Amino acid sequence: MDFKDYYKVLGVEKTASADEIKKAFRKLVRKYHPDVSKEADAGVRMVELNEANAVLSDPEKRAAYDSLGAQAQRGGGGGGEFRPPPNWDAGFEFSGAGAGAGMGAGEYSDFFEQLFGRSARQRSHGHAGSAPAAQRGEDHHAKIELDILDAYHGSERTITLRGAQLDASGHVVPNERSLQVKIPKGVREGQLIRLVGQGSPGSGGAPAGNLFLEVRFTPHPRWRAEGRDIYQTLPLAPWEAALGASVEVNLPSGTVEVTVPAHSRAGRKLRLKGRGIPASPPGDLSGDLYLELTIAQPSADTDSARAAYAALAKAFPTFNPRAAGAQP
């Protein structure tokens, strides 16, 4: 996937004001709109223009896109294969929730969908005429990164969210706010935490919108989550795998003794029932924890170690790990 330069699509500088972006977009629409254009690629260009305008005309999306662009440049991006870093948009706050008008479900590139997702498409902005007497404020959405341990024990975190707005000259100005958030025990990746009244203010006495925080887990060197289940690698010595053993394992829920059956092979999974992410609410089923076995090979860096390997070779004179049907 290529990194899309939306500024280049609209032919504007990265410092362009909202008014400059609007004028550039309208000028190009007059040139490439399929109803009036004779250009062979008018349809394709209009899709590109609409997508670029959906991002750059929205201060919040634009600020997030600019942040990602800076990361891409530091990483040697700007052309060729590009993949956004995991949870790149954690901490960015977006107002509005709907797909909005103007573009259909199939009219966004893979680049846009990976960055903003189907639920973050361009929302419709203000309406002409008089405003309704009372209107509930818009909901806001943001992704936050949590540690897997937060899901096991619950916690209270100070979350800093980054947003953006236009100044008097139409340029994007970043802003941020910090909120004290209670993380419930049993939260899982993808779950939404609702903060009532933390969205946009209402008008005419109507209530404010809500803020929805979508949970993402920070990548962990030991554990990974799939739903409520947790997966963890368990390295074994060759003799532990062959003969069986009782080993001490540090789990997110604490330290336990695990019995490794004899004749265990690399890739085998040991299931620890109910040791995954706790149920929420109580009464639901807790997840399981799976230990994925690997075999760690000792180094032959001493005379005694080399002698031990030589004795092992003599004990298995017919063993050929490359033979058909041989297993690790």
Image (spheres, rainbow, N blue to C red):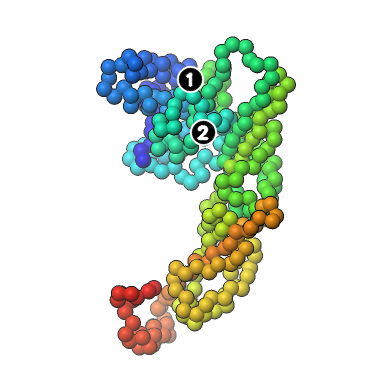
Q: Secondary structure at mark 2?
A: helix
Q: Secondary structure at mark 1?
A: loop
Instruction: Identify the residue shown where x is 33% and y is 40%.
Output: 80
The disc placed on residue 120 is 2
The front one of 258 and 237 is 258
Q: Position of residue 306 (x, y in %)?
A: 39, 83
**Residue 243 versus residue 273 in the image, above or below:** below
Circle 2 crowding by C-alpha within 10 Å: few under 14, some 14–19, many from 20: some
Q: On the rendered structure, is 252 left or right of 62?
A: right
Q: Position of residue 95 (x, y in %)?
A: 58, 30
Instruction: Identify residue type, mark 1.
Output: Ser
Q: CA distance from mark 2 to mark 1?
A: 22 Å
Q: On the rendered structure, is 166 left or right of 109?
A: right
The disc placed on residue 17 is 1
Instruction: Identify the residue shown where x is 61% and y is 32%.
Output: 140
Figure disc tally = 2
Q: Position of residue 129 (x, y in %)?
A: 59, 11
Instruction: Identify the residue shown where x is 45% and y is 68%.
Output: 267
Instruction: Identify the residue shown where x is 47% and y is 75%.
Output: 264
Indicate the quadrant containing the N terminus: top left, top right, bottom left or bottom right: top left
